[in-house]
Amino acid sequence: MDKKTTSRDGTRLAYEVTGRGPTVILVSGAMSTGGTVAPLAARLADRCTAVVYDRRGRGASGDTAPYAVAREVEDLAALVEAVGGEAALFGVSSGGALALEAAASGLPVRQVAVYETPFADFLPGGAEREAVYKEQLNEALAAGRRGDAVELFLRLTGLGEEMIRGARQSPMWAGMEAVAPSLAYDDAVMGDGLLPRARLAAITVPVLSVVGGASPEWMREASRVLADTVPEGTYRVLEGQTHMVEPDVLGPVLAGFLTG
């Protein structure tokens, strides 16, 4: 990340800019940094100015206690100001919930696009599952058990026990433990895990809700209802895609929405 800006509470945020055209800030999800969405930024660069950044508590960005979702909205406000005072937002997974909350809070953004924000009220038992995860995650992080926190998240995403054991032995595990405290941030961004209908109804800009056609039915339903709930929403299915969407597939759809 070659650029820095400062959020309202003094937290330094690392970001980089690529491409030309309408500006869009890419918001990563849990267990990720700006580098996670950098391939998508590269795919957008011929039609958009794409901004990637490390959310607070990750990568090259700083962190300031106590955490609040409002601080991450302020981070986005600082980034919008740093890149010229006008931008759209794109968020993947829980990063989509942050982008939507920023728009609902009145952040002056042009458009919002999200990919598979995992609102759990469309998953049978999803609300209860989210509540158990929240309790266990907070316990693990309070006790300094970062590895256990990462395991909890991986199980929540559906990863099997054998794959989790393999992940613990991989070179990537240290990096995953390093960002484990930020899992609590994404958990806070998701709230109670349910679709925040009142907040979504307050969004006054166009919203694109995208989902993979090979993703679970509950995820497709959550994405569709999201688009139906905002005043100006569009729903799009990318056939054959899963939660790990391919930039070459998502990029043209997102660029088309952003360039209008």
Image: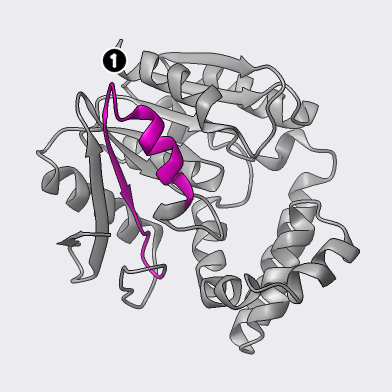
Name the residue: 70% across, 32% down. Answer: 242
Q: Quadrant of residue 164?
A: bottom right
Please tell me whether residue 188 is drawn above or below residue 93 in the rendered image.
below
Quadrant of the snapshot with the N terminus = bottom left
Judging by the rendered image, the residue that carries numbered circle 1 is 259
Residue numbers of the magenta segment: 36-57
- Please state if 242 lies on the left or on the right of 50 as rendered: right
Location of residue 3 in the rendering, given as x and y in whole percent from the top left corner: 18, 58
- Say whether residue 230 is visible: no
Q: Quadrant of residue 59?
A: bottom left
What SS does tag 1 mark?
helix
Task: Give the residue type that dot 1 points to.
Answer: Thr
Residue at 51% in and 40% down: 92
Residue 123 placement (x, y as % from top left): 79, 38
CA neighbours of label 1 inside 10 A, class few (<14), some (14 to 19), many (20+): few
Q: How is the image coloured?
A: one colour
Q: Tell me the residue at 70%/62% (across/down).
A: 153
x and y percent of residue 62 in the render?
30, 73
Q: Residue furthest left?
A: 84
The answer to whether residue 119 is seen in the rendering is yes
Q: Decide whether residue 14 is among the magenta residues.
A: no
Q: Nearer the viewer, residue 225 or 42?
A: 42
